[in-house]
C-alpha cells in the first residue's frame, strides 16, 4: 500500500467529482492514465469527474487507496479518517 496522502480541507471536497479531480491534479496525471491504472475506462472517469456519476463502489475506492494512497473512506464520503 502506498503511504497515505495529505488530504485537502473537507469543505472543498464535498462531492466525489471534486475528490477525484483533486487526486488527478495532485498526482499530475491525465484522467486517461488514472483510468488505465485502475483498470476502468476513461469515459467512466469522465462521467465521475463531471458529476454525471455520483458514486463509486467500495472495491474501487479501496483500489484508489492502494494505488494512490488516498483513504478509501475519504474517496467515498469526503470524511477525513477518524471522523464520523
Image (cartoon, grey):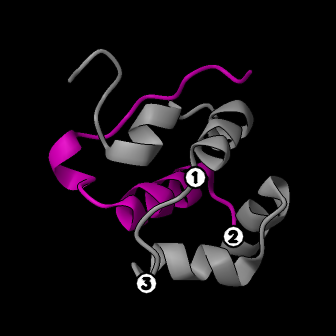
* Element under disc 3: loop
Count residues near mark 1 (Cα–Cα under 10 Å), then give few for <14, some for 14-19, many for 20+: few
**Residue 55 drawn at (x, y percent):** 45, 62
Q: Earlier in the sequence, mark 2 or mark 1?
A: 2
Disc number lying in front (2 or 1): 1
Residue 47 or residue 56, whichever sits in front: 56
Q: Is residue 23 magenta?
A: yes
Q: Circle 1 sits on which residue?
A: 57
Q: Circle 2 sits on which residue?
A: 30
* Quarter residue 51 falls in: bottom left
**Residue 18 drawn at (x, y percent):** 36, 63
Residue 75 or residue 22, whichever sits in front: 75
Residue 23 or residue 44, whichever sits in front: 44
Q: Is residue 29 magenta?
A: yes
Q: Are marks 3 and 1 in contact (CB under 8 Å)?
A: no
Q: Circle 3 sits on which residue?
A: 52
**Residue 73 drawn at (x, y percent):** 43, 33
Residue visible at 53% across and 52% down in the picture: 23
Distance (Cα) linking label 3 and label 1: 15 Å
Q: Earlier in the sequence, mark 3 or mark 2?
A: 2
* Element under disc 1: loop
Q: Earlier in the sequence, mark 3 or mark 1?
A: 3
Q: Which residues are magenta?
A: 1-30
Question: Residue 35 has which mark?
Answer: none
Distance (Cα) linking label 3 and label 2: 19 Å
Amino acid at each position: 500500500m502506498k503511504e497515505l496522502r495529505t488530504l485537502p480541507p473537507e469543505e472543498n471536497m464535498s462531492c466525489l467529482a471534486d475528490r477525484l479531480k483533486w487526486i488527478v491534479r495532485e498526482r499530475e496525471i491525465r484522467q486517461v492514465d488514472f483510468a488505465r491504472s485502475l483498470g476502468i475506462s476513461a469515459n467512466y472517469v469522465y462521467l465521475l469527474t463531471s458529476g454525471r456519476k455520483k458514486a463509486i463502489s467500495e472495491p474501487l475506492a479501496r483500489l484508489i487507496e492502494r494505488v494512490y494512497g488516498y483513504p478509501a473512506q475519504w474517496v467515498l464520503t469526503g470524511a477525513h479518517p477518524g471522523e464520523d
